[in-house]
Amino acid sequence: MKEHTILIIDDEPGIRAVLTDILEDEGYSVRSAGDGIEGLLMLDDACVDVVILDVWLPNKGGIDVLKEIKEKQPEVEVIIISGHANIDLAVKAVKLGAFDFLEKPLALERIITITKNALAIESLKKENKRLKAGIPPEDEMIGSSKAINAVRERIAQSAPSDAKVLITGENGTGKELVARQLHRLSKRSNGPFIEVNCAAIPDTLLESELFGHEKGAFTSAVARRKGKFEIADGGTLFLDEIADMSLSAQAKVLRVIQEQKFERVGGDESLTVDIRLIAATNQDIQEAIASGAFREDLFYRLNVVPIVVPPLRERKEDIPLLCSYFLEKFSGKESIRSISTAGMELLLAYRWPGNVRELKNFVERITIMSDEEEVSSETVGFFLNEKRKSVRPEEMKPFAGMKLSEARDAFERRFIEMKLKEHEYNVSKCAEAIGVYPSNLHGKIKKFGIELKR
């Protein structure tokens, strides 16, 4: 995963130090500058994703720095902070393109949350720019099986229309790829593709995320904010994991679909947008309807074109093609590797509960952990945990009538006896090998009545 870079521009060393520590703890790369001119120079020299910018700066004021950032790198999100905040200044900053406006003293958890949100929007902007430029996606729909060809055919048939699509399938099957392909082949391909993971947004924030909010709608709403429906105008809105929405949120989405209009949170102005709606879920939607967790009327509104993405176990003939694709992707074209025939047989026999995503992660793991030109069946088996998955029933018979605590003790005794024998009953060496203190091992030996043979 790409490491995001945050640039802090603030003339207070203490603020820079605190923000740097917090953001680095979150896994970000952080750079900092003490004035606007230095900050702009850093922005030119480094690939920055988000800027945290103080309004009051020496040499060049924060508002002027904001203007220059938005002129040079409009995709970079800017979070404005100020110890002398007022509504007029906040509105001016947001109108100039600031992502958000925060007052000092800073609430550190809020800084983290807003930074994550800003990074998400920045990624969307870059994705839309890439789509408009016609750059191919990171991953493609790989395979020649009957099952995946049926999905391709359904995409080709439905993409040119504006019909709503409901994509269903297990985790890791490639539902997002289907949604992106629908967008790329549609008449909206030059418009934005906006994705919302409904499962990742708290219910209390989902309405604002989807429909936006007006200034003053709630405590932190210092300015008007567009929602995802507005941002997707002219393009495609992809509601992923829609079955994880609360019933109240489902009702609001249904109303927008039925009436083709909505209001921002805290507003009374009716807005209309021109979007193509695609939804996806990994849940059994009929079961969710039967249990009352999903609205049947919303299902019928969304399910104009149903697309079911098959699990990998139902298209195993695609596994060799997928492996070749991922090996090339992760190994580099100069050193393309392969998987042995015996290794491929193990992959074909495995059920892949995590589907294509699991296979992708598996191939990436073996390219990192193994230097074999042709990956052996032993390597494949090791990383698939074949020994654990192929435990024979007769091996479990000694534990069959035991409770969990008894079975755990029985296994632990066997394991310690085996390891002691391996290390010629040297307790210190054995303890080091199994990762415990010698005193702990002595306690176990006493507990289980293990005889130390000399």
Image (cartoon, helix red, strand yellow):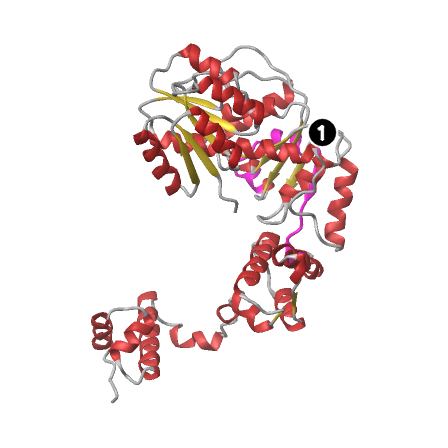
Asked whether residue 74 appears in the rendered view, the answer is no
Residue 406 is left or right of residue 378, and the answer is left
Q: Residue at x 58, y 33 (%)?
A: 124
Q: Image quadrant of residue 85?
A: top left
Q: Which residues are magenta?
A: 287-314
Q: Secondary structure under badge 1?
A: loop
Instruction: Give the residue pinned by disc 1.
Output: 190
Specify whether residue 202 is painted magenta.
no
Percent from the top left, x then y, of residue 245?
52, 33
Q: For this view, does 383 lie left or right of residue 190?
A: left
258 versus 111 height, above or below: above
- Dividing the picture into quarters, in which one does residue 409 lie? bottom left
For the point 36% across and 34% down, which residue is it? 19
Q: From the viewer's perspective, is residue 143 above or below residue 132?
A: below
Q: Can I make out residue 343 in this image?
A: yes
The residue type indicated by label 1 comes to Asn
